Image (cartoon, grey):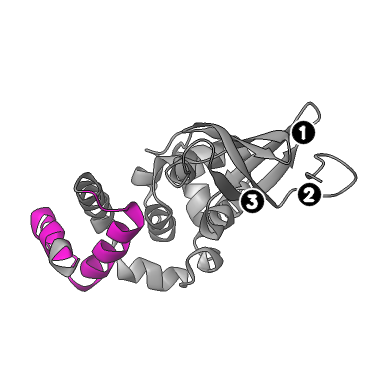
Amino acid sequence: MPPTPGKGKRMIAQLDGVIVEKAPTSVVLDVSGVGYEVFIPVSTYESLGDIGQRMKLMTYQHVREDALLLFGFASKKEKSMFARLISVSGVGPKLALGILSGTTIDNLTLCIVNGDVDRLTKLPGIGKKMAQRLSLELRDKLEDVTGVPGAALAAAVPSESIGKLEEAVMGLISLGYARADAQRSLSKILAAEPDLPLDELIRRSLQKA
């Protein structure tokens, strides 16, 4: 039996079904003959298989007076960050999804713990006051997302290195590397040598691959 949206107090925590439709902002999963539209961040879209393949998503169920909405995530890390974002006053599920789609979780975490308001305001729907609120309310609450205390994260990759990190990540992606692998490799190199120029950073990462 497929899950029943809105019945009693049961919440849909995950869906496992066949991909019927997909777009960068949503996917439709067929679960035992019932199609569920699930809103997703871009990072989850990049993890989807082809139409007709099975996919399991962790979900957050948002109930409104006029609708029941499902938000889906390919990883626990994405869902945990989403939950933290919507705990901030003024951040609803749609805005949280836009934030997650605007950057990587690692970059978002670094911006928050470093109080990097300038970079946060470049994310969709985020003004200066909201950026300050995100940093103030979440900087010490992201250990469950990253597994690393906020202070340690801030020390690992300084705020001024975040832009260079993202540029290098995009460079490696263009060479065929997966975002997660590129992010992991580059972050380790930057933590040890934050002053490396962009071209050398990419070269070092390629040598370690």
* Above or below for 176 versus 152: above
* Magenta segment boundaries in residue numbering: 176-205
**In whole angstroms, how far apart are the C-alphas of marks 2 and 1?**
14 Å
Question: What is the three-letter code of the residue carrying label 2?
Answer: Met
Name which quarter of the figure residue 18 lies in. top right
- Majority SS type along the magenta span: helix
* Residue at mark 2: 11
Instruction: Determine whether, in the image, residue 106 is placed left or right of residue 31.
Output: left
Q: Are marks 3 and 1 in contact (CB under 8 Å)?
A: no
Taking the image as shown, residue 88 lies to the left or right of residue 127, namely: right
Going from N to C along the chain, the mark reached first, 2 or 1, is: 2
**Looking at the image, which residue is at 73% across and 41% down?**
32
Q: Residue beneath label 3, please?
A: 87
Q: Which of 77 and 136 is in front in this view?
A: 77
Q: Is mark 3 on a helix, strand or loop?
A: loop
In reply to whether residue 18 is colored magenta, the answer given is: no
Q: Is residue 26 above or below residue 46?
A: above
Q: How far apart are marks 3 and 1 (CA)?
A: 17 Å
How far apart, in angstroms, are the residues tagged by discs 2 and 3? 18 Å
